[in-house]
Amino acid sequence: MRANPANMRFVKHNKVYYRRTANKAEAVKILSEFFDRIEGKIKGMKGHAIMDGIEGEEYEAIVLTFWENKEDMDIFYKQENKLLTDLVGRLEPLFEQMPRRESYSMVEFEL
């Protein structure tokens, strides 16, 4: 997804710790397919990034989602969102613990 950085005002930071026995490639595939399926269909979502740890925390991953406004971000991350709970349910067997989520406002973003 190509996004205009000027329209990305909020970020949800999702930190994941995989089990040592987890197939990280499977997790990335599930995440990529999820974002491909919802691209352009979620109000306010402007993009995402999936990152794997490479230094010391190879079982750690970060998923960022970029949002036009906080209200749409908050709605998407509500526990009642079946799309999100289904995704987490598919990934849960790969997790050491459930993802930690934090919200941020975008101060500056340049590509």
Image (cartoon, rainbow, N blue to C red):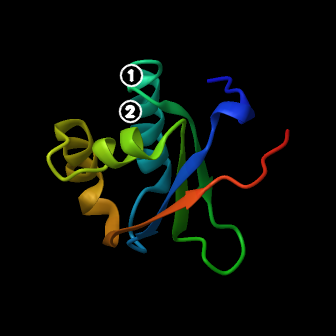
Residue 84 located left or right of residue 105: left
Which residue is found at the position 73% from the left and 35% from the top?
Answer: 5
Provide residue 55's location: percent of width, then percent of height: 72, 75
Provide residue 44's location: percent of width, then percent of height: 46, 30
Q: How many marks?
A: 2
- Residues 18 and 66: in front is 66
SS at badge 2 = helix
C-beta proximity under 8 Å, tags 1 and 2? yes
Q: Which of the labelled discs sits on residue 9, or is there none?
A: none
- Residues 53 and 69: in front is 69
Residue 7 located left or right of residue 12: right
Q: Residues within 10 Å of mark 1 (few under 14, many from 20)?
A: few
- As drawn, the residue found furthest toward the bottom would be 56
Which residue is found at the position 65% from the left and 32% from the top?
Answer: 7
Query: Which residue lies under the disc numbered 1?
Result: 37
Residue 76 placement: quadrant: top left
SS at badge 1 = helix
Task: Tell me the kind of residue under disc 2.
Answer: Phe
Which residue is found at the position 62% from the left and 54% from the top?
Answer: 51
Estimate the spatial distance between the alpha carbons at disc 1 and disc 2, rounded to whole Å.
Answer: 5 Å
Query: Which residue lies under the disc numbered 2?
Result: 34
Task: Tell me the kind of residue under disc 1.
Answer: Arg
- Residues 46 and 33: in front is 46
For the N terminus, give its image quadrant: top right
Residue 100 located left or right of residue 82: right
Provide residue 31's location: percent of width, then percent of height: 43, 41
Q: Residues within 10 Å of mark 2 (few under 14, many from 20)?
A: some
Provide residue 101's location: percent of width, then percent of height: 41, 65
